[in-house]
Amino acid sequence: MPGQENNYEKLNLQPDIGFDIRFVTMKHNSPFHWHRELEILYILNGHATVNMDGERYELKPLDAIVMDCAKIHEVLYALPQTMGICIHVSRQLMRRYLPDVEASGISCAEKRLTEEQRPFYTEICGYLKELTVLYVDQKQTYQLRSTALILNILACLTEHFGVLAANASPVAKAGNMERLERICDYVEHHYAEEITLQEAADELGLNKEYFCRFFRQNTGTSFIRYVNQVRIDHIYQDLLYTDGSIQEIMERHGFFNQKLFYRMFKERYECTPRELKRMTKNSPFL
């Protein structure tokens, strides 16, 4: 069964290239996660939802959104057929051309555009469309042309969508990311077991009350809900790729409250587990 990356995504970008492009479909859903790279998502068909900074962003075909470096976010691709391209750009590549990159960030989403930004957003979407064609064709000059387009996108983002970095110091931010990385890795390894708030707090050496506040402030959700989202996403993958019964798959991934499971599953995917299996049975996107 294809693997799924959750929480902190450790991406291995080739240092001499500095970016990665890949197709994404419904099988790439993930709960809240982050990475040290800038991420750009461009939807080709279907519909996707991004949850970030307590806001919900709905993306339709030919829409783009940017998730800044270390920005905690969640992406859900709508059923039954959604496809996009996802680009990750390393901090090293950005520093090569923007030495003071740490002092600023990027905020680019269709729902937040000003009238002045709209033509530049359209320009970026044009570059992304070209990049998609290059990625599909993979001609001899692919690396040269795709690098040129990535640099054009970064220049446009920097000039027209740059924002001041948050007031928190880089050290404090790094500390928060490291804590979250530790606890999310812990969840990924133990999600099929019963995980208590106390056990999670002990993992970070924090008291339970502070841990609950810390987790919600940095992810926008409660720890218990996050654990159940991780379980549901693993269940989702098994529903796509295995033939076990829904009850067996639920219990395999540590979900025993059937009523809560069905409610959360429908909230997340806007369908029941049975409807999911029926809709995706012959999907060319899986």
Image (cartoon, helix red, strand yellow):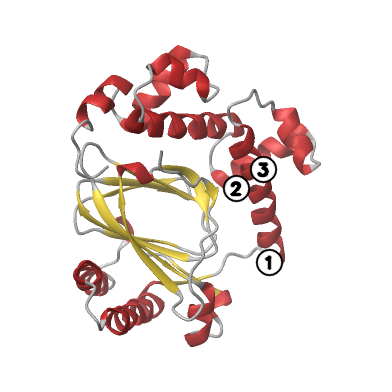
- First along the sequence among labels 3 and 1: 1
**Residue 93, percent from left and from top:** 49, 79
Could you tell me which secondary element the residue under label 3 belongs to? helix
- Identify residue for label 2: 218
* In contact (CB < 8 Å): disc 2 and disc 1: no
- Identify residue for label 1: 169
Crowding near the residue tagged with mark 3, few <14, some 14–19, many ≥20 C-alpha atoms within 10 Å = many
Q: Residue at x 27, y 82 (%)?
A: 145
Q: Quadrant of the C terminus?
A: top left
Question: Is residue 171 in sight in this rendering?
Answer: yes
Instruction: State the separation of the CA atoms marked 2 and 3.
Output: 12 Å
Crowding near the residue tagged with mark 1, few <14, some 14–19, many ≥20 C-alpha atoms within 10 Å = few
Q: Amino acid at mark 1?
A: Ser
- Identify residue for label 3: 183
Instruction: State the separation of the CA atoms marked 2 and 1.
Output: 15 Å
Question: Is residue 110 in sight in this rendering?
Answer: no
Q: Residue at x 50, y 30 (%)?
A: 231
